[in-house]
């Protein structure tokens, strides 16, 4: 279990989540420093979305605790200014234009009009959406919607950004823009918690990786450390290591039954 770190941007201790007799999380602990891009991996049903909802204060654990930037994650009012969240299905209004959507979010976030206008213009330009900013979101392609949703999640300059499959379904150019922006967010000192099935994206941008399997973290470390711990000799890809540590057979060198 990661050691408690008072300076961690994300600190989760022994998270457990049960739905009746169904256990979704079984003792998940995380300690993620500020400025880190943390790749969160796991097969479908491993508990990734459940973990992200707990970390963002949208759901409460059955037991365990979460602190984000030193704040109790159960206090949504205090937590909200510090956290950005891009779920796999982004909350966008089809009848709004991208600019109207972002103005609406800026108002909800109590961002001043002057600051919001400048930041929206800059982000729309960064994601090549200026020419389409006044068109209805309902007419947008998946890639345009995803870029709008990403802008929405970083508009208030959060300290911790949670991303659930941010590049899923995007063309290579749009996916690269998202990857570049993830790096920019981390370079600014913020922390990025990235959940995705696209392992090359994680290998390209993540400083640390955690692999969730059956509700438990079964491997954690830098991408190279995770690869070296799996029975791949440290020479395979992150995909090889992922497949090794999420098989039903014990695959970690030096693994114990603890």
Image: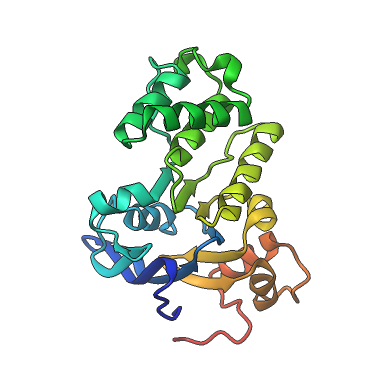
Tell me where residue 253 sits by quadrant: bottom right
Residue at image coords 48%, 52% = 44
Nearest the viewer among 226 and 145 is: 145
At which x and y percent is residue 178? 61, 40
Left or right, residue 249 beside residue 154: right
Nearest the viewer among 113 and 72 is: 113
At which x and y percent is residue 212? 48, 64
Please state, as top left, top right, bottom left or bottom right, where the N terminus lies in the image. bottom left
Extreme-front residue of the structure: 114
Residue at image coords 56%, 52% = 188
Extreme-right residue of the structure: 235
Please state, as top left, top right, bottom left or bottom right, where the C terminus lies in the image. bottom left
Left or right, residue 32 beside residue 254: left
Q: Is residue 245 above or below residue 46?
A: below
At which x and y percent is residue 196? 55, 50
Q: Is residue 245 above or below residue 192?
A: below
Residue at image coords 50%, 12% = 135
Is residue 115 shown to the viewer in this render?
yes
Is residue 88 shown to the viewer in this render?
no
At which x and y percent is residue 203? 68, 57
Nearest the viewer among 204 and 113 is: 113
Q: How many marks?
A: 0
Tell me where residue 15 sits by quadrant: bottom left
Color scheme of the displayed model: rainbow
């Amino acid at each position: 279990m990661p050691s408690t770190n008072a300076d961690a941007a994300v600190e989760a201790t022994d998270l457990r989540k049960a739905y009746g007799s169904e256990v979704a999380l079984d003792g998940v602990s995380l300690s993620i420093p500020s400025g880190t891009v943390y790749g969160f991996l796991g097969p479908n049903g491993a508990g990734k979305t459940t973990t992200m909802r707990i970390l963002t204060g949208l759901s409460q654990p059955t037991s365990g605790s979460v602190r984000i930037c030193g704040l109790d994650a159960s206090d949504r009012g205090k937590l909200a200014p510090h956290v950005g969240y891009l779920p796999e299905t982004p909350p966008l209004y089809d009848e709004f234009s991208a600019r109207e959507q972002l103005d609406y979010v800026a108002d909800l976030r109590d961002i001043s009009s002057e600051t919001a206008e400048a930041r929206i213009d800059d982000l729309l330009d960064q994601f090549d959406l200026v020419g389409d900013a006044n068109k209805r979101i309902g007419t947008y392609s998946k890639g345009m919607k995803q870029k709008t949703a990403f802008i929405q999640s970083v508009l208030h300059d959060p300290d911790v950004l949670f991303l659930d499959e941010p590049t899923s379904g995007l063309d290579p150019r749009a996916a690269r823009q998202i990857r570049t922006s993830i790096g920019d967010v981390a370079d600014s000192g913020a922390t990025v918690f990235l959940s995705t099935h696209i392992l090359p994206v994680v290998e390209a941008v993540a400083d640390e990786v955690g692999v969730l399997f059956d509700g438990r973290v079964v491997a954690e470390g830098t991408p190279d450390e995770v690869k070296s711990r799996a029975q791949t000799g440290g020479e395979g890809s992150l995909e090889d290591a992922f497949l090794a540590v999420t098989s039903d057979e014990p695959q970690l060198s030096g693994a114990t039954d603890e």
